[in-house]
Amino acid sequence: MTTQTAPPEAPAKQERRKLDENTLRNLGLVGVLVLLIVVGIITKPDLYSDPTWVKNNFLTILQQASAIGVVTVGMTFVIIGGGIDLSVGAIIALAGVWATTLATQSYGAGGMIFTALVVGIAVGLVNGVLISYGKLVPFIATLAMLVAARGLAAQISAKQTQVSANDFINSLASERLLGIPLLVWILFLVVAAGWVLLNRTTFGRRTVAVGGNPEAARLAGINVKRHTLLLYALSGLCCGIAAIMLTSQATSAQAAMANLYELDAIAAAIIGGTLLSGGRGTIVGALFGVLVFSTITNLFAINNLSTEVQNMVKGAIIVLAVLIQQFRYKSLTQLFKR
């Protein structure tokens, strides 16, 4: 008696199935956003009855999401590639502090932006070298960098807040283009670039391959070590951009800035559909994840609720998202195979 094996699924059908899954997931996140807005209308009807306030509040949510959204794009690439980066908040602090030293500010806005980007990329490269060539576990390598980068930022700033005296940098948070804050435009540009990089380039396909099966990727001719190095450099670049954005919003930088950003970025990527085990994820989903958390933060703020309760709600959402990934992914896959 011979057994017949099912023919492999055609690449076009696989791609179509992934698109259907991503669409369903994104629609679910849109539903969550709508639900949060409904909660806001119920709890604060006096505010939501004012169209001007609603518009300004929406722009406020987007602006609050801008910096963490940029970081989440880099984090999404790292997780899809099979890694994790716990040092993003510390990298932002180090890049921000280094960019606002008196010596750096003497070179003007260009010097500050260049410094923040270079510091971010450099620290990301160090992470990548430790993980790719030093064979350290990403969790350990980036955890060590979290501590080291925060310490170096505190050393450089002498544990003091460094004020930005550059008008151009400070105006980034207040300037608007077509009525939309400039920081939101920066977020959209980074998200668009990330989407193209992940979905329309060889780099993106290699990222998915490396995260899905590193050994198979190596046998296919992909330089896994070099690609992993580039992923952490990309994460560092996003941190450098975020450092300038946060410095603009606060008109200053300090060693404690961007505290717990690594957890927010990881959580946003996860609820956006990125698998912690690597090999699958979307930039659009990650953006929706960021917006969900920013909307929750805004909802708690307008209702004068404590940060502790807010963190508990966020934690519950993260757990729920991971459980959905574990128990629903296989069933959804079987559904779209029919």
Image: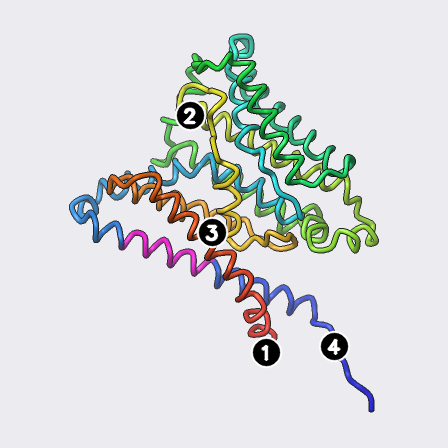
> Label 2 to label 3, Cα distance in Å?
32 Å
Q: Which residue is mark 4?
A: 7
How many numbered marks are there? 4
**Where, quadrant-wise, is the N terminus in this rendering?**
bottom right
Which is more toward the observer, 177 or 222?
222
Residue at 58% x, 40% y is 74
Mark closest to the chain's N terminus, 1 or 4: 4
* Residue 59 can be seen, yes or no: yes
Residue at 43% x, 12% y is 165
Residue 318 image label: 3
* Residue 186 can be seen, yes or no: no
The secondary structure type at the circle numbered 1 is: loop
Q: Residues in magenta?
A: 26-38
Residue 30 is a magenta residue: yes
Residue at 19% x, 44% y is 47
> Label 3 to label 4, Cα distance in Å?
37 Å
Label 4 near label 3: C-beta < 8 Å?
Answer: no
Q: Which residue is mark 2?
A: 172
| Mark 1: amino acid | Arg
- Residue 152 falls left or right of residue 31: right
Q: Which residue is mark 1?
A: 338
Residue 323 point in image, percent of width and height? 51, 60
| Mark 3: amino acid | Ile
> Label 1 to label 3, Cα distance in Å?
30 Å
Label 4 near label 1: C-beta < 8 Å?
Answer: no
| Mark 2: amino acid | Leu
Which is more toward the observer, 162 or 51?
162
